Image: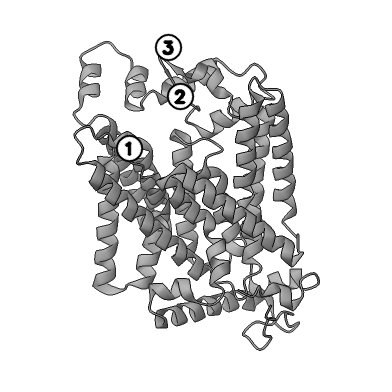
Amino acid sequence: MPAYDNRRKWSLTPSSSDPASNDYTQTVMTEQKFAASSSAQAGVAGVFLREYSFLYWLLIAPAIALLFYQIARGLGNSWYVLYWVSAVALIIRQRNFEFPAAPLIFYAALLAWGTLSAALSVDPNAAYGKWAKYALLGSSYFITWWLVRRIPEFSLERALKMVGMVGLASFAFYAVEFLVLSRAPDFQPEIQVHGLVPACLSPFTLYLLRQTFTGHRGLALTVGYLSSLILLLVSSDSLTEVFALAAALVAVSFYILPKGRLLRLLLGSLALLLLALILAFDTTGSVLSRAYHSDENWFEVLNQLSSYRTYIWHRAITIPPPNQWLGVGPSNVSLYPPVVVEGIVTVRHLHNLFLDCWYEIGVVGLTLYILFYAAQIHAMKPGMANRSTLQRGVMYAAVAGVFVASMLEQSYVSVHVAMFVPFLFALYSRGPEGRDLQAHARDVPPKSVAVGF
């Protein structure tokens, strides 16, 4: 295993004369160094083929897992298990088990509470299975946190471009799948195709296009990609996917537009969101027309526009779990009344992250769940302070897209919420180079910092 070369730009032991004010300069110089070298190595291809490529591939494996889950659930599960086993083996090989304290404490407490809720549920076997899957998905935070501190001269620029390439592949698969399946006479886009993954990864794809291509060519590629994605999402007739993309674009706009335009942007975005809702679920205006000429109340109209989501939420609130502190157990909400729509259709979850989490693992579980994410955000602050405005914007945009999707459709244990969001928080958690090395210099010898792949 090759030792780390102390003649490189950053040494393992930070100089005592190096002031804290130089931390940001060092980070920027590292990013500029990568940008210059990657453009010299065949552009986008250089992002994947530079040194420490194995560690970078392992680092962005959760993003690749999203793509594989989009293709097939079994493929996504297989990839994630392979990623998890490889990462754990690497951590054991390096014999360094230092992780952030607060997220680890809340994660352990959450797993313990969920296990108790599963043990007392009506169907403990299903509960244990779902909770074990969440435990594996949630551990992506700690794996990513560990990896970003083991890659010498870690470049967030390179990692973001790699995630952007995954987003581009996700969009390509989505477009091809839509075009192929749309030829069938019984094509049902809202069921057969899913565009949530390319919508949530779109900020990183836009970042890749912006950083790789300049001038009119870059603008044409960006507009073409974004227009095609919007057209596909609207044609798929999915409220969640349209809203997720809209939320991501609104969030990233706050970081790239002058502050004087934010109010107009916000008002325009709200109008577009309302228009997207009507277009996605009432293209012909039949629902609104019937409501205008009938005595239906607006709750019923909203219920029809939202595909009975408001009905499910109302039932969950008015028929709470028998034990609100403990919940009914993971994967057990489908055995209770709120998931039965008008006595006919049964859904698997409540289509809202907070309601779903509260109903299955109770008030205590929901509190621990929120605290786990709050601890991740707090641990991310040192790294976020030294990132460019655009880099911060694309991360918050992706999180905003996932958050909106989780409010309308995704469960609290979905791969988007349980795996991808913690992955992003950990990806941005690494602080200035000198500060990280000082924190780990006593425990991590030079040879174990640079993993030789």
**What mark, if any, has residue 56 been given in the picture?**
none
Q: Earlier in the sequence, mark 2 or mark 1?
A: 1
Q: Which residue is mark 2?
A: 347
In percent of width and height, residue 1 lies at 69, 77
| Secondary element at tag 1 | helix
Q: Residue at x 25, y 53 (%)?
A: 227
| Secondary element at tag 3 | loop
Q: Quadrant of residue 296?
A: top left
Q: Which residue is mark 3?
A: 343
Location of residue 113 with respect to 139 vertically, above or below? above
Q: CA distance from mark 3 to mark 1?
A: 25 Å
Q: Residue at x 43, y 44 (%)?
A: 72
Q: Earlier in the sequence, mark 3 or mark 1?
A: 1
Question: Three-letter amino acid code at disc 3?
Answer: Gly
Location of residue 441 with respect to 393 vertically, above or below? below
* Disc nearest the viewer among 2 and 1: 1
How many C-alpha atoms fall within 10 Å of the one at disc 2: few (<14), some, or many (≥20)? some
Q: Residue at x 21, y 37 (%)?
A: 184
Question: Three-letter amino acid code at disc 2?
Answer: Val
Q: Quadrant of residue 242?
A: top left
Instruction: Say how the picture is coloured.
Output: one colour
Q: Which residue is mark 1?
A: 192
- Of 423 and 243, the residue lying toward us: 423
Locate residue 197 relative to residue 214 in the image: left or right.
Answer: right
* Disc nearest the viewer among 3 and 1: 1
In percent of width and height, residue 40 lies at 41, 83
Q: Would you say the residues marked 2 and 1 are in contact, meaning their CB atoms lie under 8 Å apart?
A: no
